[in-house]
Image (tube, rainbow, N blue to C red):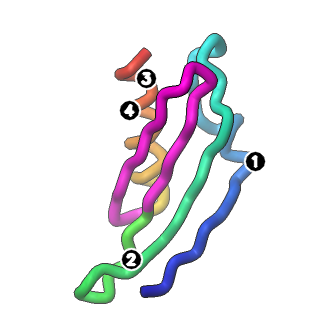
């Protein structure tokens, strides 16, 4: 399995997260499933200790879903 891990400083500003719950870290990884399709996994750790992990078929979709999960928990 091919896994690449990225730390994306610029994507902190791209996510519209309410200011009291600033993100501490943001990660992105890609992997292949059993049918050799790329899966994108994003995760974020908030300052209040909450963690969010999202899987998607496309990179942009993964970040949009991550933003949605963070907003829903706020």
Residue lying at 63% horizontally and 11% vertically, measured from the top left:
20
Disc 2 or 3, which lies upstream in sequence? 2
Judge by depth and name the residue closer to the eye, 21 or 60: 21
Quadrant containing the N terminus in the rendered view: bottom left
Measured in 3D between alpha carbons, the distance from the residue under mark 4 to the one under mark 1, in whole angstroms, is 19 Å
Callout 1: few (<14), some (14-19), or many (20+) C-alpha neighbours within 10 Å? few
**In the depicted structure, whether residue 31 falls above or below residue 68:** below
Residue where numbered disc 3 is placed: 71
The residue labelled by disc 4 is 69
Residues at circles 4 and 3 in contact by the CB criterion of under 8 Å? yes
Mark 4 in CB contact with mark 2 (< 8 angstroms): no
Q: Which residue is mark 1?
A: 9
Q: Quadrant of residue 25?
A: top right
What is the CA distance from the residue labelled 4 to the residue labelled 3? 5 Å
Whole-number angstrom distance, CA of label 2 to CA of label 3: 26 Å
SS class of the residue under badge 2? strand
Q: Which residue is mark 2?
A: 38
Q: Which quarter shows the C terminus?
A: top left
Range covered by the magenta-colored residues:
41-58
* Above or below, comparing residue 28 to residue 1 in the picture: above
Looking at the rendered structure, the secondary structure element under dot 1 is loop
- Residue shown at the point (59%, 35%) measured from the top left: 15
């Amino acid at each position: 399995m091919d896994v690449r891990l990225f730390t994306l400083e610029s994507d902190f500003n791209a996510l519209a997260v309410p200011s009291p719950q600033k993100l501490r870290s943001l990660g992105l990884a890609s992997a292949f499933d059993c049918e050799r399709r790329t899966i994108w996994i994003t995760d974020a750790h908030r300052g209040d200790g909450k963690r969010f992990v999202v899987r998607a078929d496309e990179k942009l979709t993964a970040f949009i879903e991550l933003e949605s999960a963070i907003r829903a928990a706020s």
